[in-house]
Amino acid sequence: MFEGRCASGSLRCAIAVEAGDREPCSSKGTRVVGVLETMEASENGHIETRASPAKSGEGNFGVSAHILACMSQYRGVPRVPLHPASGNLCLTTHAVLDNLVLVFLMTESGTRSAGLCHGAAPRSLRRGTAAACSSPRSPGAQLGGGARRGRACPGNALPPSARAAPLGGGGRAAGRVRRAGPGGGPGRRGGAGRGGAGSRERAARGAAMGKLLAVALVGIAAALAAERLLAFRNRLNASREVAPVTLPNCRLIKGIETGSEDIDILPNGLAFISSGLKYPGIKSPAPDKPGEIFLMDLNEDNPRAVELRISRGFDLASFNPHGISTYVDKDDNVYLFVVNHPHQKSTVELFKFVEDDNSLVHLKTIRHDLLTSVNDVVAMGPDSFYATNDHYFCDFILMFLEMFLGLNWSNVVYYSPKEVKEVAAGFYSANGINISPDRRYIYVADAFDHNVHVMEKHANWNLTHVKTLQLDTLVDNLSIDPHTGDIWIGCHPNGMKLFYSDPENLPASEVLRVQNILSEEPTVTRVYTDNGSVLQGSSVASVYEGKLLIGTVFHRALYCEL
């Protein structure tokens, strides 16, 4: 329990005393109540202690030399001559259990008169009364007893002549301390029995404290897990249900059966649709089928989806398309950026669209250490873009822990052949990203934080936060009406249903329209909601000339005329 050291090794025991007088350096009324343990000596001139358990209290206080005399009556501790004929001694304490003070005793050499130590006793030591243990027959009487105030322990080591034998057994003594037997042998209440019982009692107390600590730790862990689980359910909107909002002229698009996760519409009405995403944690209807890119011409009276052919040399077998974005240069060349997850990694594939034969020519694959878990991109040039990382980790288990623990480690990265850098951070799950028609602001959807961030774009491509629009749903991809600047959002009313696919409890779909997002009070309109009976897990909504396309993570796609 405790450890003390003396420079000369002359004392190798510890005692327990009960403080009597209220004065900090007085021994009046102080009595020995027990001898604790045998201690080792070292070359350090001061007492070093470790206490467990420990309450308040740390300091020194003095008692007269008759404490040493009382201790010398105990078995195994001879009378110790002081040096020279003084009674200097020091009691050092680091733990207080009510009035029972656990201390270490050491004598101090010097020429000062009998025993005063520097420093005051802790307040918890300055209470209680008891009869002094010295008697006329005790060696304490020969040493003079009594303590004088105002002196300090010199702190020197004991002289080599003062050698004390180690305590033979020790243990906790109850009541008064008995004299040692002749020759230092045990007294009537001496030691091995009491020592063994004390050791067993200490072991039992230690075991009980260990169990109590284990129970406390389990309780804390359970409380933390419960709090995180509740917070995670709130992030998922696990209990939210939506009332249906229907549109009069809608139909499912033929040919799209395995999802339409993102949609981007060119100014001329050609719509690109990514399909076949396999995303960790979400059940795919066709896990072995490669992803596809579809094209729809919304200028037609009855538009249909056509799969685009991808040029040779590209690995179609591992094609797993996610977010997409288009860029049209001054020569009307169309570039398509596609987030790809081959083998659960993240790359951005750059294609050039050839309209004459409805094909995509693969130009290059972009990889970078900052593009770790890419969700969506918005093109800034023929080979530059902003990208969102929806998680810090790319391993599914670590991704789940990141979300469960509520770590805001998601970010936005700017990429160009000359520079790659993080430009915004602190998102819970950065998802869809897009740009305002005037190209001054970047919009970032934080899916599990249920909001849209407005970021100002600077000449060096850095982003600064302008405002946040809080919503009550899981926001996915963002599309911008080029004429009005309105933001159309594909949303998940209940994320729990999206991840825990249940044919009896289908994930719902929701489309929001945000007008005047830069104003103090933007207008948010719920344009479409469905309980999953028609469309499951909506992820994007894009408009063109009064026509609306609604895509999904893994289900079908809906075409509506507004």
Image (tube, helix red, strand yellow):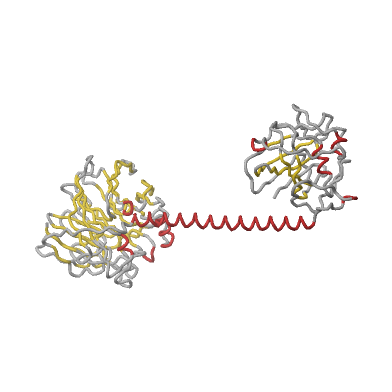
Q: Name the side, left or right, on which 139 lies relative to 400.
A: right
217 or 262, nearer to the observer: 217
Is residue 331 something one can see in this rendering? yes
Q: Name the side, left or right, on which 237 lies relative to 483.
A: right
The spot of residue 113 in percent (x, y) is 82, 29
335 or 36, nearer to the observer: 36
Q: Quadrant of residue 529?
A: bottom left
The spot of residue 155 in percent (x, y) is 77, 34
The spot of residue 463 in percent (x, y) is 33, 43
Q: Quadrant of residue 393?
A: bottom left
Is residue 360 something one can see in this rendering? no
Q: Name the side, left or right, on which 252 lies relative to 40.
A: left
Q: Residue furthest top?
A: 150
Q: Residue at x 75, y 27 (%)?
A: 149
Total tally of numbered discs in the picture: 0
Quadrant placement of the C terminus? bottom left
Q: Residue at x 74, y 37 (%)?
A: 30
Q: Quadrant of residue 264?
A: bottom left
The spot of residue 25 in percent (x, y) is 73, 32
Q: Residue at x 24, y 68 (%)?
A: 309
179 or 424, nearer to the observer: 179
Q: Residue at x 79, y 57 (%)?
A: 192
Q: Residue furthest right?
A: 183
Q: Name the side, left or right, on which 130 lies relative to 408.
A: right
